[in-house]
Image (cartoon, rainbow, N blue to C red):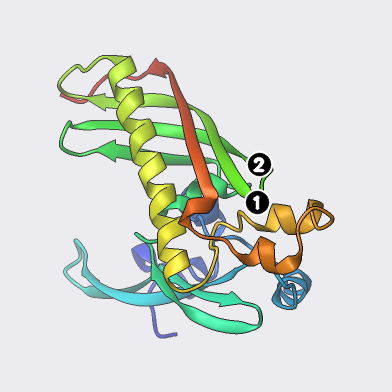
């Protein structure tokens, strides 16, 4: 790729070659080694996401246009077939299901509020019935970094919880539209409950399969607010 790195460093310092910082704080797509990719490719349940890259032409302070690569979405692969492409907004819910994700900043722009959420933990609970259904529980601690209107902590937590729930539901619905499960919610049933439901029943995953999403973000401390 004919792309540039930041601050005139070698190409080896670009996002494409040194992704460690991106993966720690900005990257939410699942990271698979080759043998994991092959194993999942032939699996009867589950979705693989292959990152898509776009070149963004940006003017920097040195008044020179730079071609900076960035991840703009992902290609969905399921049951050995290409199912479609989803952009970053469609995949926003992935952040809360990534085991490697360390930290992210979430903003409520209209209210001028920002929080840093650290090491979110998400649990998928499989519910009994004629077909599997699911409860999703997201827990994390957060640091308040902006609160211009001095809103109460409990009020901010409530709005953050609603936003995260909306992101998860959006990713679920966008995936269902192209017959995929980007969050791999049904994969848990395939791995641990095959004696309870047959394969076709497990694969019958739709938006009604999600019974409840409970988000519990606790703001435990705050920095000096930006005013």
Mark closer to the chain start, 2 or 1 = 2
Q: Residue at x 33, y 16 (%)?
A: 154
Residue 33 percent across, percent down from the top left: 72, 68
Residue 3 percent across, percent down from the top left: 39, 79
Q: Is residue 91 visible?
A: no
Residue tagged 2: 127
* In front of the other: 191 or 19: 191
> Which numbered circle lies on residue 31?
none
Give the answer, above or below, for where 227 lies relative to 63.
above
* In front of the other: 212 or 124: 212
Which quadrant is the N terminus positioned in? bottom left
Left or right, residue 92 beside residue 226: right
- Tags 2 and 1 in contact by the CB under 8 Å rule? yes
**The quarter of the displayed image where residue 149 is located:** top left
How far apart marks 2 and 1 lie (CA) works out to 6 Å
Q: How many marks?
A: 2
Left or right, residue 218 beside residue 64: right
Which quadrant is the C terminus positioned in? top left
Residue tagged 1: 132
Give the answer, above or below, for where 139 lies relative to 6.
above
Q: Tell me the SS state at disc 1.
A: loop
Q: Residue at x 65, y 78 (%)?
A: 79
* In front of the other: 64 or 156: 156
């Amino acid at each position: 790729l004919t792309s540039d790195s930041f601050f005139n460093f070698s190409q080896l310092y670009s996002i494409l070659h040194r992704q460690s910082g991106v993966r720690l704080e900005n990257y939410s797509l699942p990271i698979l080694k080759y043998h994991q990719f092959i194993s999942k490719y032939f699996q009867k349940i589950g979705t693989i996401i292959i990152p898509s890259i776009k070149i963004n032409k940006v003017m920097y302070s040195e008044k020179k246009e730079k071609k900076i690569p960035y991840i703009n979405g992902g290609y969905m692969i399921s049951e050995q077939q290409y199912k479609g492409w989803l952009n970053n907004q469609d995949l926003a819910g992935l952040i809360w299901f990534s085991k490697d994700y360390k930290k992210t900043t979430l903003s409520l722009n209209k209210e001028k509020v920002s929080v840093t959420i650290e090491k979110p933990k998400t649990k998928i609970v499989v519910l009994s019935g004629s077909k599997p259904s699911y409860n999703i529980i997201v827990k994390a601690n957060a640091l308040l970094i902006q609160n211009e209107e001095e809103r109460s902590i409990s009020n901010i937590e409530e709005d953050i919880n609603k936003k995260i729930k909306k992101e998860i539901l959006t990713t679920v619905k966008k995936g269902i539209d192209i017959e995929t499960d980007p969050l791999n919610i049904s994969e848990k049933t395939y791995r641990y409950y095959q004696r309870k439901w047959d394969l076709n029943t497990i694969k019958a995953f739709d938006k009604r399969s999600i019974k409840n999403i409970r988000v519990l973000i606790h703001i435990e401390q705050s920095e000096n607010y930006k005013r």
